[in-house]
Amino acid sequence: MLDLLQDPAVRFVTILGLGGIGKTRFALEVISQLEEQFQQPFVFVPLSALNTGDELLPALAESLGVRLLPGGNLKQAVLDHLSSQQTLIVFDNFEHLLDESILIRNILAAAPQVKVLVTSREKLRLEDETLFYLHGLELPGEDSEQPVEAYDAVQLFLQRARQARPDFSSAPKTHRP
């Protein structure tokens, strides 16, 4: 994923995956590793609380710190603000606003040094969209010869269980008669 966002030819990446698989966490980890490559800090736009597409542009403007002058056009103000920026915009949970994806096309056209990273359960279906599929962690199969602790899914479970209960053990309990 890092190499995608570091590629000058790739300006728009959508992280696709099932709900709850960790798309947001993954995106935040990626951008933390890329922060120094952009002149301005990344812009994170959480979308899960938005109810309609009409709320997308104001949410982006707020995240950017763009203030609208009386009688001004908010979309134009946002595009003008971004036109000279070199930054990464992250739209998190875009799947319920797919009809508003034209805003991303407008941003990419108006701001040649801006990159966009989207997390979604569905493709946005824009022409320059690069897809990155996030799959779940591997689980041991019935015929697995490796110990269960060798699998990432089990390691993550054990890590989280020990965070919740420091005395947690995966070893089977022995019963005393």
Image: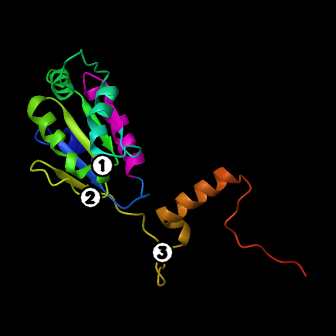
Q: Residues within 10 Å of mark 2 (few under 14, many from 20)?
A: some
Question: Which residue is tagged 1?
Answer: 94
Of residues 103 and 2, the one drawn nearer to the viewer in this rendering = 103
What is the distance, in whole Å, between disc 3 and disc 2 at their CAs?
28 Å
Is there CB contact under 8 Å for labels 1 and 3?
Answer: no
Q: Amino acid at mark 1?
A: Phe
Residue at coordinates 47% horizontally, 62% vertically from top-left?
152
Q: Residue furthest right?
A: 177
Q: Which residue is mark 3?
A: 140
Distance, label 1 to label 2, CA atoms, is 8 Å
- Quadrant that contains the C terminus: bottom right
Query: Is residue 39 inside the magenta stretch?
Result: yes
Q: Earlier in the sequence, mark 1 or mark 3?
A: 1
Residues packed near mark 3 inside 10 Å, few (<14), some (14 to 19) or many (20 plus): some
As drawn, 128 above or below 169 = above
Q: Residue at x 18, y 43 (%)?
A: 12
The span picked out in magenta is: 23-45
